Image (cartoon, rainbow, N blue to C red):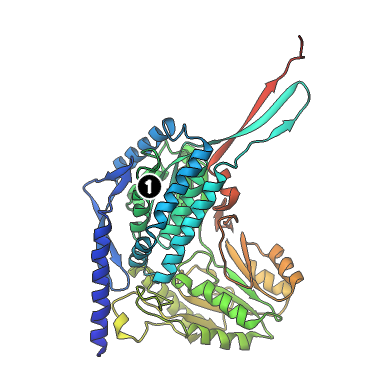
Amino acid sequence: MTSGEHRGDLLEAHLDAHGRVDAISDFHAWIGGAGHETGEQLETRDPAVDRPVTTVTACDAAAVDRAVEAAWTAVDGAWGETAPAERGRAILEWTDRLGDHVEELALLETIETGKPIAHARGEVEGAIDTLEYYAALSRDQAGRQLQTGEDLHVYTRHEPYGVVGQVVPWNFPTWGAAWKFGPALSAGNALVLKPSSQSPLSTIRMAELSEGIFPEGTINVVPGTGSTAGAALTEHPDVRKLSFTGSTGVGRGVMHDAADTVTPVTLELGGKSPFLVFPDADLETAVEAVASGIFYATGEICDAFARALVHEDVLDEFTERFVEKAESYQIGDPLEESTTLGPLTSRDQFEKVTDYVEVGRSEATLLTGGGRPADEELADGWYVEPTVFGDVENDMRIAQEEIFGPVQTIIEFSTYEEAIDLANDTDYGLAAGIGTERTDLAHRAAADLDAGVVYVNDYGPIRPEAPYGGFKQSGIGKDLGREALDHYRRTKSVYVNLDEPSL
């Protein structure tokens, strides 16, 4: 079979998948418990073949107003009257329904992001697990009683904000949405969520699958552009809390918008995460961890291990093993179970990554990758080979700027102090990794690293029980864990003065 015939087979498979996507839903906005049309539409594209998939409703400011109004109706009505245990049961009922649609949701995520189907399936399952966790937390929320004296009784109570606005990025549309949905609903809020205009399909479908479970208006999804729907949401005077996941640059704008209405914000932003390979590290384990941390999701992940800091004693062996590992990835059709690295999600991201590869060629030594795969079958997609640069200095652009693609930099260090200094010498502080067999070294480095999440001898796993969020320009506040609940509720202190008892 010729390469052109192979290419035709891939296109045919994707066009068939596009038909299956069209059969799933009309993909309108979800407002007030029903689909909502505005007359405007956005086109979604399949990055593996660079073809349109389907259209979705594009929301304007009027649609966002309607969604916020619907959310307040839920808060002031049936949802606001729902007890914590009932909230938990509703979330669990939703997870059961989502569990019946795992393959459908995985297909949507693969088609809109280019993520390998096996990875997309795992992320849908992770989204369900996250929602289950917050269903359990719904009935385990309590205030405090404060010991102040016999004549005064003081206690605290937690209350939801009411209506919260949420924005999720294009790289993790299903799992990322669950990170927002879960704690907001568990705390008793109604929500208006804007998915990325590049990958709105799975998030819309999640909302549709909530029909009949939550009171109308509890969950609202408003697809659209950031400049229109996004701005209308982040500037809205009736939104009491904002939670945003995305780039640091856009996050600054969200924070600025929120300042005008003094709206509290949670921001999960960019990263340039290091992985420190100490001389005692098991190199097979370290190579696997670093490779997973930069090539998973084609490097389009905020906590990617984009800087491998390697001790001079093991630099040569680590580099040799890592290049071999990078070249072993199965680049291919994301609909195939065997594919381990799919395309980048968009032309814009492809152009950004390839521009950085050219910067890297001028700054450092290209060890492998750097171009499109040779397979003609993949020529129409936004594919970039796993790319590795050696002889990198930490002040180079490829070591300091977030590339958001499958591009690894390898940086040498000599001492523990130098390793920590290099790791922390960045504007970001989302995540970091440590490769060592010494318990004392692992705990010492974890304490010294200026990052909100630290992985030891692995990349992940991310568990819903553990708070997730960064330091410095990687954001403010936490997703996941009990800590996320505190970002979706207000604390009130109640003082009850007690008279002397008399009969």
Q: Is residue 200 above or below residue 423?
A: above
Q: Quadrant of residue 437?
A: bottom right
Q: Amino acid at mark 1?
A: Ser
Quadrant of image for the C terminus: top right
Residue 326 in the image, given as x and y percentages of width and height:
49, 82
Q: Quadrant of residue 396?
A: bottom right
Residue 502 in the image, given as x and y percentages of width and height:
77, 10
Residue 211 in the image, given as x and y percentages of width and height:
35, 45
Q: Look at the image and tell me whether residue 108 can be seen.
A: yes
Asked if residue 461 lies left or right of residue 223, the reply is right
Asked if residue 148 lies left or right of residue 345, the reply is right
Q: Look at the image and tell me whether residue 249 can be seen.
A: no
Asked if residue 248 lies left or right of residue 317, the reply is left
> What residue is shown at x 24% (from left), y 60% (from top)?
22
Helix, strand or loop for disc 1? loop
The one nearer the camera, 205 or 271, is 205
Looking at the rendered structure, the number of numbered marks drawn on it comes to 1
Q: Which residue is mark 1?
A: 210
Asked if residue 2 lies left or right of residue 427, the reply is left
Going by the picture, which residue comes out furthest to the top? Answer: 503
The one nearer the camera, 425 or 86, is 86
Quadrant of image for the N terminus: bottom left
Going by the picture, which residue comes out furthest to the bottom? Answer: 1
Going by the picture, which residue comes out furthest to the left? Answer: 39
Residue 478 in the image, given as x and y percentages of width and height:
57, 52
Q: Is residue 199 above or below residue 492?
A: below
> What residue is shown at x 23% (from left), y 50% (from top)?
40
Q: Residues within 10 Å of mark 1 (few under 14, many from 20)?
A: many
The one nearer the camera, 165 or 282, is 282
> What residue is shown at x 35% (from left), y 40% (from top)?
67
The one nearer the camera, 157 or 62, is 157
> What residue is shown at x 42% (from left), y 66% (from top)?
120
